[in-house]
Amino acid sequence: MSGSSAPRGPERLAPGAREMMEAMAAVFPDVGVSVHDAAEARRIFALSMPEPPREPPVGEVSDRLIRGPEGAPELPVRIYRPYEEELAGGAAPTVVFFHGGGWVLGSLETHDATARAMCRASGAVVVSVDYRLAPETRFPEPAEDAYAAVRWAAENIAELGGDPEALLVAGDSAGGNLAAVCTLMVRERGGPRIAHQLLIYPSTDPLAETESRRLNAEGYFLTEAAMNWFGAQYFAPGSDLTHHYAAPLRADLSGLPPAHVVTAGCDPLCDEGRAYAAKLRDAGVPVSEAHFPGMFHGFLAVGDLLPDSSEAMAGLGKVIASTASDRKIHGEDGGPEG
């Protein structure tokens, strides 16, 4: 696992990473320390966030409401379509994307640039999902929202212009948890078929006691205090934190879709992301990994400002594009190992 013999302090970060990380931290509410109310955290976050630049450009963007779980409200989604010349003929892959934010923060707006970049990198249709947030909606309801969005995308894939054999799920951080849980739900509920799962520094076990959680508990954007606060919002008192919808790392992972797992060496969640990739591989699931030793949690959000972020997105695009052809990426490394 990454981190056991790594040096401490800022020298572990790649060149330029600390400046980017500190810029992100400056607009992020200090949850679990000075901010304890979810509504207040969202207010601070919204006031601090710059106006989205609507970059990189894509062919078409549309907002709509889709059917949610039975008895639940409709779900807002934002659909990104590539330029026609990027489709290279035929139907495109379709990615159902779940944003991060500890199941409490985040929205279609906060991850607009990430969804656009994914669309551009892959030539895929990206459906970004505005699932309900905690603590107003707690475990496992946001996961049910995620599954409902996957079902909707599968049922409407022709309208989306998607390849019915190339439906993927993706998410970062808490969204990575939801993407992983969707694959378990799909297996247990008989569909729809998912061609690939893309897990970007995912949370896979809320009870994990790992070296990366210890080594990166402070000073690398995502802190131990914040993780504890996020968990307390998402999981109601008495929740079973070992349930596989809470902790997919504790599940039987056999028969799941191929996976691409992105991890960062200066991230508390690094070890559980890498452990999830290893357990998938042990279960016979094809896995590719992209590990960036000098990166921090959330680094994909800085786009082209860091070379590792650009490389990680290019790797995601390559995996997504491969699902619509015979050029599958199974078991290959998608980034620098450390």
Image (tube, rainbow, N blue to C red):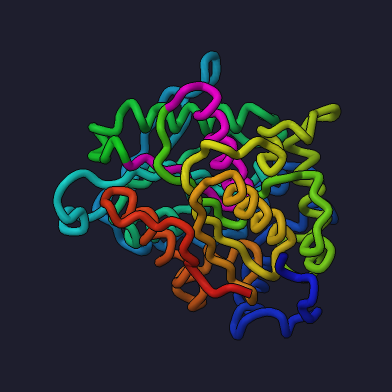
Residue 208, compared with residue 294, is above or below; it is: above
Q: Give the residue drawn at x 67%, y 49%.
A: 203
Residue 224 drawn in magenta? no
Quarter occupied by residue 94:
top left
The answer to whether residue 168 is magenta is yes
Numbered range of the magenta stretch? 166-191
127 sits left or right of 138 in the view: left
Instruction: Answer left or right for 145 relative to 35.
Output: left
Q: How many marks?
A: 0
Q: Main secondary structure of the magenta part?
A: helix
Where does residue 56 sit, x and y in percent of width and height?
35, 64
Which residue is at 43% across, 64% downward? Answer: 315
Q: Residue at x 33, y 42 (%)?
A: 166
Which percent across, then down, holds residue 25? Answer: 68, 66
Residue nearest the viewer, comparing 206 with 291: 291
Indicate the position of residue 80 as horizontal and vertical percent values.
33, 48
